[in-house]
Image (cartoon, rainbow, N blue to C red):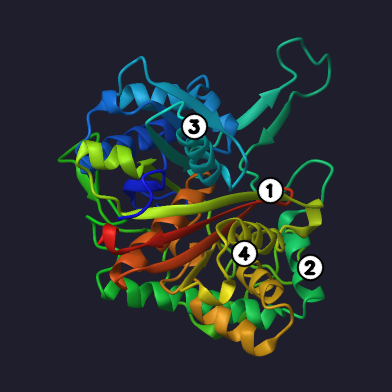
Amino acid sequence: MGNQNDIVIISAARTPFSKFGGLLKQIHSIELGAMIIREVLQRSGLKGSDIDEVYYGMCIQSEAALKYNVVARQAMLHAGLPPETLSLTVDRACCSSLAAVQLGRKSLLLDEAKVCMAVGAENMSNTPVVLNGHRWGTGLGKPEMVDHLNPIMYVGFNSLAGDAGAVALEYDVSREMQDAWAYASQMKYQAAKAAGKFRPGEEVAAIELSQKKGDPVIFAEDEFPKPNTTPEGLAKLPPVYGSATVTAGNAPGLDAGASALIITKRATADALGVKPLGVILSVASVASAPRGIAEVPAFAIQKALDRASVQLENVDLIEINEAFAAMPLVSTKILADGDQTKWEELLAKTNPNGGAIAIGHPVGASGARILMTAMYELRRRGGGVGVVGICGGLAQGDAAVISVDESCL
């Protein structure tokens, strides 16, 4: 069933996401990437030699520099893939691992590869403080030290939180609405967890962490969710980074984790004897003026839907990365074109199991995460069509349309 040229996902998993300063705090993201590469390969039943290309998303390049960069190559080699495997590190801010999916898809459609892997990894706890000015001397001045754990500020631009908050208010998306969305994200995650949706073996893969003393620790569930969140507690938090509406409560944490998917054509999956999990119908990328970061998921989603010839009303599920609560609220309002009833319908379809505000947002890993989250939820529902969208620093946006049909179940 299905077109033999369909691009299908044949394996997908992520590590549990760790909170800032949590269990993963001293593990380099390359190691996390290697862990998840091994996991998705083992789940697929393929050999390392079956993977032609690895595209690897990562944002915080100063953390990469602790291991002298070339992180895609290092991670795939540490994972045991053959040295002949091609790889490329991708930095499109938070969109990076979804951009990795796009690049792999292009190689498959051009028949330049038969099987590709899209990976994303980040450890924001492991980000260094960078010392500069010491190499050539500073005279009587002090060397400059810069903390590179700075995912929401760029030199010469407004803070991302500031822009997101300002744009949200322009769309009449208030601080109270953002807090309500954040609370709902936490509660939806807890309900999904209680239902077994984040049990290791599906989207989440348990990983083993060695210790200096004693037995290894098995890390098996997300560390960031806050089940004791209350609306009253969220309302008391002050805005951050000069934003009118963004707080530590309606934004995600500074997290760590890795995600990966293996994609191929349906014909190749059939030849390898591997059953597809989902079909990627289309992908899209957009960019906008930097202050419009809360809007770009909507623009990317609409572009992807147009390419797939799918109408928004026929979408069963939406995943929009919660870089801040402003993103799903503003973007769905844009998609609803100002229609209040339609907006409420779209919100009811969006992030049904919670989003990054609860799960976490290890920035390089989040694009692949929302794609597999949508896919696994559609599988639990017995099939359907979903669309995912994510924003990246300075108003970049990526999206994908995914379906789960009878051949995937």
Task: Give the mark nearer the N terminus: 3 vs 4.
Answer: 3
Categorize mark 2 by other alpha carbons within 10 Å: few (<14), some (14-19), many (20+).
Answer: many
Q: Label 3 to label 4, Cα distance in Å?
A: 33 Å
Q: Are marks 1 and 3 in contact (CB under 8 Å)?
A: no
Question: Does residue 27 appear to the left or right of 285 in the view shown?
Answer: left
Which residue sits furthest top? 136
Task: Give the mark nearer the N terminus: 1 vs 2.
Answer: 2
Report the amino acid beneath label 3.
Ser
Q: Quadrant of the C terminus?
A: bottom left
Residue at image position (71%, 12%) is: 135
Q: Label 4 to label 2, Cα distance in Å?
A: 12 Å
Residue marked by disc 3: 107
Badge 2 marks a residue whose secondary structure is: helix
Q: Label 1 to label 4, Cα distance in Å?
A: 12 Å
Question: Does residue 67 appear to the left or right of 329 in the view shown?
Answer: left
Q: Which of pointers 3 and 4 indicates the residue nearer the eye?
A: 3
Q: Label 1 to label 3, Cα distance in Å?
A: 26 Å
Report the amino acid beneath label 2.
Val
Numbered circle sitting on residue 167: 2
Categorize mark 3 by other alpha carbons within 10 Å: few (<14), some (14-19), many (20+).
Answer: some
Task: Give the mark nearer the N terminus: 2 vs 3.
Answer: 3
Categorize mark 1 by other alpha carbons within 10 Å: few (<14), some (14-19), many (20+).
Answer: many
Badge 1 marks a residue whose secondary structure is: loop
Between 222 and 355, the residue placed more toward the observer is: 355
Residue marked by disc 4: 324
Q: Are marks 2 and 3 in contact (CB under 8 Å)?
A: no
Q: Which of pointers 1 and 3 indicates the residue nearer the eye?
A: 3
Report the amino acid beneath label 4.
Phe
Task: Give the mark nearer the N terminus: 4 vs 2.
Answer: 2
Numbered circle sitting on residue 393: 1
